[in-house]
Amino acid sequence: MAPEGHVSDDAAAVRAFVLRLARAEATSVVDVPGGIGVRHALYPASYEHNRLLLHEPLPSSQALAAADDVLGAAGLPTGGSTGSATGRPTSAPTGSSGRGR
C-alpha cells in the first residue's frame, strides 16, 4: 500500500510535468482563466500542440470562450479543445450527453 498522500503527490507531479512540457514545446503560451492556452506555429493541425490546459475548475462557457480567444483568434479549430492538464475532458462537449449516442 502506498503511503498516505502518495497518489496526490504523483498526480500533482504529472500535472506539473504536462504543463512544463506544453509550455516548452509551444511557440505561443497564453494565460487563460483556470490554466493556459498553447499554440505551435509549425503544427497548426495538431490538437496536442494547440489546446487549452486547464488545471482549475472552470464553467464550460468560460472554457469555450477562452478557446475561441486563444485558438480561434489564431485561425485554429476550437471544437473539443477544453480539457484538463492530463488531457481528459473537464466536461462533455456542448450539446452532448457524453454517452456516445
Image (cartoon, rainbow, N blue to C red):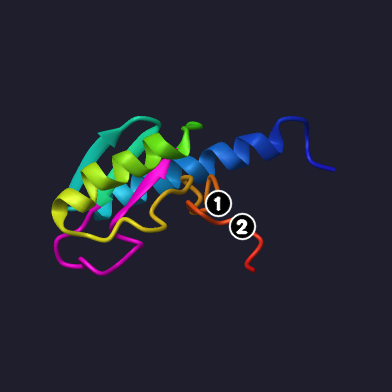
Q: Which residue is mark 2?
A: 98
- The three-letter amino acid code for the residue at tag 1 is Ala
Which residue is drawn at the image coordinates 35% and 62% (left, top)? 48
Q: Is residue 37 magenta?
A: no
Q: Is residue 46 magenta?
A: yes
Q: Which residue is mark 1?
A: 92
SS for callout 1: loop
Q: Residues within 10 Å of mark 2 (few under 14, many from 20)?
A: few
* The C terminus lies in quadrant: bottom right
- The three-letter amino acid code for the residue at tag 2 is Gly
Pick whichever, 59 or 6, lies toward us: 59
Which residue is drawn at the image coordinates 37% and 58% (left, top)? 79
Residue 71 image offset from top left, x and y in percent = 23, 51
> Tag count in the figure?
2
Q: Residues within 10 Å of mark 1 (few under 14, many from 20)?
A: some
Residue 38 image offset from top left, x and y in percent = 27, 49
Indicate whether 100 appears above or below 73.
below
From which residue to which does the magenta span run?
39-54
State which quadrant residue 46 falls in: bottom left
Residue 2 image offset from top left, x and y in percent = 79, 41
Which residue is drawn at the image coordinates 52% and 51% (left, top)? 89
- Return the disc, 2 or 1, that comes first in the chain's sequence: 1
Indicate whether 99 appears above or below 52.
below
Residue 78 image offset from top left, x and y in percent = 31, 55
